[in-house]
Amino acid sequence: MDIDLHYIEKGEGFPLILLHGNSGSSSYFNPQISYFSKQYHVYAVDTRGHGASPRGTAPFTMRQFSEDLRGFMDAQNIKKGHILGFSDGGNIAMTFAILYPERIEKLILNGANLHTGGVKRHLQIPIEIGYRIAKLSAAKSPQAKQKCELLSLMVNEPNLKAEQLKVLCMPTLVIVGSNDMIKASHSKEIADALPNAKLVTLNGGHCIAQESPNEFNRVVDAFLKGNL
């Protein structure tokens, strides 16, 4: 791995790794870090080129982010852990699960999507327009290049198929907001494809972990304890 990922570490016990969304950082999960560190060894990781993690030179792709996660787990001597991914973090978690299923005890996918068709079209269109505009200026402006790379992750990725999830046997929680940017039918497709998954919808939008942290934490806690 060409970089060292920045992360927040708190608590003791079985590892719980938190993966934030596009353009975010580990601080997104502050309510979850505080809550779950009482029971688990929590690692909230800044994705490559996000938060305080350096960009490095490797490609900006879900596959690379998944390899970064594997390198991080190896460096921390985490052979297996629970993984909770939000939005693009959920897409990284799904990709990682397909590549390294033996490294995951339980999987939580919050607002994840297999492909861009899973995003509500009226929300995806502005992202695609912003990407095209940033791409035009990327060669001349470092800021535009950075924006182009971030938006590319929501325009050109992920590229997963429901069939790839059918071999994943780890217990999985698919948790979304009632007014999520991800289509409800798409979240159901993900949950239905996973052999051992539960789908939970909470009142709120895409960022339910921040909007309703108490309810979100309660559901995730129950799932991790096998009470859901």
Image (spheres, rainbow, N blue to C red):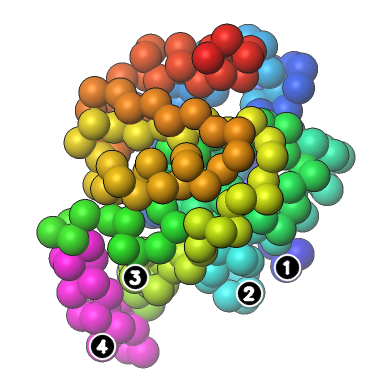
Q: Give the residue at x 47% y 40%.
A: 191
Q: Position of residue 59 (x, y in %)?
A: 58, 75
Closer to viewer: mark 3 or mark 4: 3
> Closer to the observer: label 3 or label 2?
3
Residue 93 x, y percent position in the rendering:
58, 48
Q: Which residue is tagged 1?
A: 2
**Camera-nearest label, 3 or 1:** 3
Residue stretch rendered in magenta on the structure? 124-144
Q: How far apart are the two marked residues, 1 and 4, measured between alpha carbons?
A: 28 Å
N-terminal-most mark, 1 or 4: 1
Marks 2/1: CA–CA distance: 8 Å
Q: How far is disc 3 from disc 2 in space, using C-alphas?
A: 19 Å
> What residue sits right under mark 4 in the picture?
136
Is residue 175 left or right of 19 when viewed as pictured? left
Q: Earlier in the sequence, mark 3 or mark 2?
A: 2
Label 4 Cα neighbours within 10 Å, binned few <14 / some 14-19 / many ≥20: few
Say which residue appears at 68% left-offset and 18% top-offset.
40
From what the image shows, is residue 43 above or below residue 144? above
Residue appearing at x 20%, y 36% in the figure? 179
Q: Which mark is residue 71?
A: none
Quarter of the figure with the N terminus: bottom right
- Which amino acid type corresponds to the residue marked 4 in the rendered image? Leu
Q: What's the CA distance linking mark 3 and mark 4?
A: 15 Å
Callout 2 touching callout 1 (CB < 8 Å): yes
Q: Identify the residue at image location x=27%, y=74%.
A: 131
Q: CA distance from mark 3 to mark 1?
A: 25 Å
**Side of 148 relative to 103 (left or right):** left
State yes or no: residue 133 in magenta: yes
Q: Image quarter for residue 7?
A: top right
Q: Secondary structure beneath disc 3?
A: helix
